[in-house]
């Protein structure tokens, strides 16, 4: 039997996929990896661009037979081919079928919810780790909370996180935002606990959980806070991660509550950014989107290298224990968070799955539709710290 590759990057002709190929080539030359996508010529161009000699796999997202060739040829799949509700479903099914672990960069929680319903139990039974939202959506939130709570060292009542960043959106991200609006989605897909396992939410959590955020001065972190564009995606992932960890007797606290905001140094910045966020939402949900979408970046287009190099992200986590004791932790990194950081996060997530699974949350045979915290945990934190991502206690 032919030896399997370590990793196959599916969607490697896209903007983020190409960054993943570059990251693996430059930082892990001994890793045996291949690339996959729909267009042979474009895939060859990726090889030429990065002076890469590797296996090339041609597979459309709807071609189960071709996808099976990918998932039966590797230990781990990195998927950057979005929108994932269009191109990702059969890849996940193939990974579960053929026992390949999987990480992706989606923020499409409605699609993750569908994958949970279809594949969680089988993946759990087979010990296959399917880990979505392994980029800037939603590793800083999910893994940052995991780090903060474990560092805190006692049962936690709540974690409130605050995020600041500098970067730009790519055409792929913009396409996902606009494409999701055209779907007829059930309201339950957007509930505060939409990704939680059945019967994992207490009455206290339901009562105390709110995602409403106003622009206001926050004395705890000495900053102005307001709505965070990614909070709706991130909060659901964090809550699922906490619930899955609790199933393994490694939870944060029986009635743990999580909330997420953006933060700014000035009041003016908080109000302007919040206005722009609401304006963007208005455009997406009205017929204006048909006129605005053609003016924005197309899939495959992304920020310039100078923009990516000049970007950053920083998250603060205010942890309150059941005793009322409080501490603040942080997670931060340099580079455009949506692309340069995302490619680092998802690649290191995939590499975490190549080691001894006894060190991962749940142990060697654990699986399912997981999150970074519940599927990778401290193993990924250790890798990210070595790769330049800082995790710290700040007060």
Image: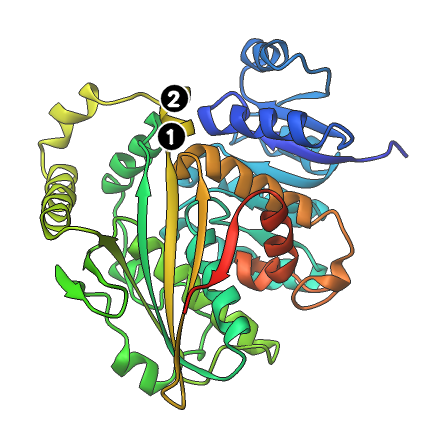
Q: In this view of the protein, which residue sits in the foreground, 322 or 229? A: 322
Residue 127 in the image: state x and y as whole percent: 70, 60
Q: Position of residue 390 (x, y in %)?
A: 51, 51
The residue depicted at 55 percent of the width and 25 percent of the height is 12
How far across and down, in percent of the image, does residue 1 sit? 90, 34
Residue at the disc numbered 2: 306
Mark 1 and mark 2: span between their CA atoms? 6 Å
Q: Secondary structure at mark 1?
A: helix
Q: Residue at x 38, y 30 (%)?
A: 310
Mark 2 neighbour class, 10 Å CA radius: few under 14, some 14 to 19, many 20 or more: few
Query: Circle 1 is placed at which residue position?
Result: 310
Question: Relative to residue 120, is residue 325 depicted above or below?
Answer: below
**Residue 177 seen by the camera:** yes
Q: Residue furthest front?
A: 395
- Asked if disc 1 and disc 2 are in contact, CB closer than 8 Å, the reply is yes
Secondary-structure class at tag 2: helix
Residue at (38% x, 21% y) in the render: 306
């Amino acid at each position: 039997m032919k030896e399997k590759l370590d990793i196959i990057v599916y969607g490697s002709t896209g903007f983020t996929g190409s960054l993943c190929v570059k990251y693996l080539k430059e930082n892990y030359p001994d890793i045996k990896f291949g690339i996959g996508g729909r267009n042979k010529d474009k895939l060859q161009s990726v090889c030429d661009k990065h002076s890469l000699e590797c296996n090339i796999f041609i597979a459309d997202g709807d071609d189960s037979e071709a996808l099976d060739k990918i998932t039966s040829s590797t230990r781990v799949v990195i998927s950057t081919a979005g929108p994932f509700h269009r191109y990702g479903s059969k890849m996940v099914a193939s990974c579960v079928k053929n026992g390949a672990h999987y990480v992706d960069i989606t923020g499409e929680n409605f699609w993750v919810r569908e994958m949970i319903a279809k594949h969680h139990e089988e993946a759990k039974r087979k010990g296959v780790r399917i880990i979505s939202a392994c980029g800037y959506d939603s590793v800083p939130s999910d893994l940052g909370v995991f780090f903060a709570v474990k560092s805190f060292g006692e049962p936690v009542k709540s974690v409130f996180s605050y995020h600041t960043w500098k970067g730009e959106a790519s055409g792929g991200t913009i396409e996902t935002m606009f494409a999701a609006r055209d779907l007829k989605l059930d309201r339950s897909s957007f509930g505060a606990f939409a990704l939680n396992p059945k019967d994992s939410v207490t009455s206290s959590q339901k009562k105390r959980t709110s995602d409403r955020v106003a622009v206001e001065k926050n004395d705890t972190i000495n900053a102005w806070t307001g709505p965070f564009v990614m909070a709706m995606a991130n909060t659901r992932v964090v809550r699922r991660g906490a619930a899955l960890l609790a199933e393994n007797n490694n939870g944060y606290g029986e009635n743990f509550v999580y909330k997420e905001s953006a933060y700014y140094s000035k009041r003016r910045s908080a109000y302007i950014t919040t206005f722009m966020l609401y304006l963007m939402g208005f455009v997406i949900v009205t017929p204006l989107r048909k006129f605005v979408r053609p003016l924005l970046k197309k899939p495959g287009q992304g920020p310039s290298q100078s923009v990516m190099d000049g970007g950053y992200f920083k998250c603060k986590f205010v942890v309150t224990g059941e005793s009322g004791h409080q501490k603040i932790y942080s997670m931060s990194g340099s580079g455009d968070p949506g692309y340069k950081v995302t490619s680092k996060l998802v690649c290191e997530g995939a590499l975490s799955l190549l080691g001894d699974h006894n060190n991962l949350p749940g142990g060697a045979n654990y699986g399912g539709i997981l999150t970074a915290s519940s599927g990778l945990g401290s193993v990924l934190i250790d890798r990210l710290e070595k790769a330049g991502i800082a995790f710290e206690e700040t007060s």
